[in-house]
Amino acid sequence: MRPGWIFAAALLGFALLPLAAGAQVYQWTDATGGVHFTSRLSEVPPAQRDEAEQAARAPSRVQTFASPAPSSSSRSSHARTRGRATEHRIPFVRRGSMAIVHVRLNDRVTAPFVVDTGASDIAIPAGVADAAGIVVGARTPRQTYLTANGPVSSPVVTLDAIEVGDVRLSGVRAHVASEMQIGLLGGSFFNNFTFQIDPAANVIALFPNDRVRQGQTEQQWRNRFAVVHQRIETLDRYLENHFTNEARVAELERNRRRLASDLQELEAEADAADVPHGWRQ
């Protein structure tokens, strides 16, 4: 059961604004090329602290944030069994009314994210996306997200891997938000679970949810397939009944082939997520 203590989608509007001054976010690269972020300089390897400290003073696309250090009982997350379900316990730190967790993307970068269960998807700042190896091109699909500052069109991507505490997921939907300075951990992550938030212990308890696939409900999968099918059917009707101009027909046929390719990619994504065929109609 989801508790009433849920961060509203309007939190995205606050995330678009500069955060109040607090602890710096330090960045360093390990020997394997992995990029890390932390709010505690003591966690940076000694040989790289001077460089990380200098970089933290420079303007950055990853915003600083202030938070109390986790207690010794909540520094590491762990999984335990409650009945037949595995419970994952993810510690967080507070910044005012916000909860912040550290998220690792594509096995390449770790960065602070605000917990926002009201947001539809994970939102990734552009700088963090770059460090995670996420490439946005002309053919990257886009979606309009409603925020407290108005609608924003952002490129939508699929993460190879995301880790929060001891939870690791693959094929999770996210969007790259160039105007944001700290990420949001949203519904495309939390929808994989039922969850409870314990504000006293600063812990989020997650339990697997078999009624979703890759963070999307049956209705969300149905909607995605319906949009593509509807566009293909509309084009087919126009091709059959409305146009005889050869140039126009050629253009519509190219659009039809692109939509068929989009449908094929969506089917492949659904296959990888083990989406039932009944959800694709």
Image (tube, grey):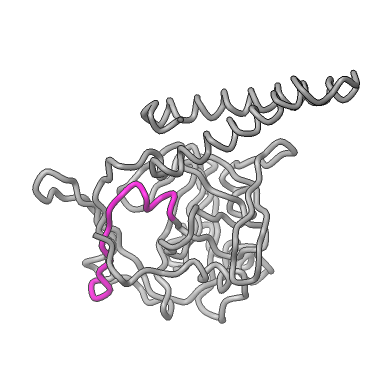
Magenta region includes residue 195: yes
Check residue 250 for magenta coloring: no
Residue bounds of the magenta highlight: 187-201
Q: Looking at the image, how many numbered discs can be counted on the residues?
A: 0
Location of residue 24 in the rendering, given as x and y in whole percent from the top left corner: 54, 72
Q: Name the side, left or right, on which 67 lies relative to 80.
A: right
In the drawing, does residue 170 fall left or right of residue 210?
A: right
Examine the image and state in which quarter residue 220 appears.
top left
Q: Quadrant of the N terminus?
A: bottom left
Estimate the x, y position of residue 182 in percent, counting from the top left: 55, 64
Residue 42 image point, x, y percent? 43, 66
- Of residues 86 and 103, the one nearer the viewer is 86
Residue at 40 percent of width and 33 percent of height: 279
Determine the residue positioned at 37% across, 38% down. 213
Q: Residue furthest front?
A: 241
- Nearer to me, 74 or 98: 98
Task: Report x, y in % for residue 37.
Answer: 50, 59
Q: Is residue 133 left or right of residue 79?
A: right
- In the image, 170 versus 54, the foreground residue is 170
Please tell me whether residue 219 is drawn above or below residue 71 in the rendered image.
above
- Is 269 rendered above or below residue 117? above
Residue at the (44%, 64%) spot, across then down: 116
**Is residue 164 or residue 97 the one in the foreground?**
97
Direction left: furthest residue:
83
User: What residue lies at 34% left-to-right and 66% top-to-bottom?
Assistant: 92
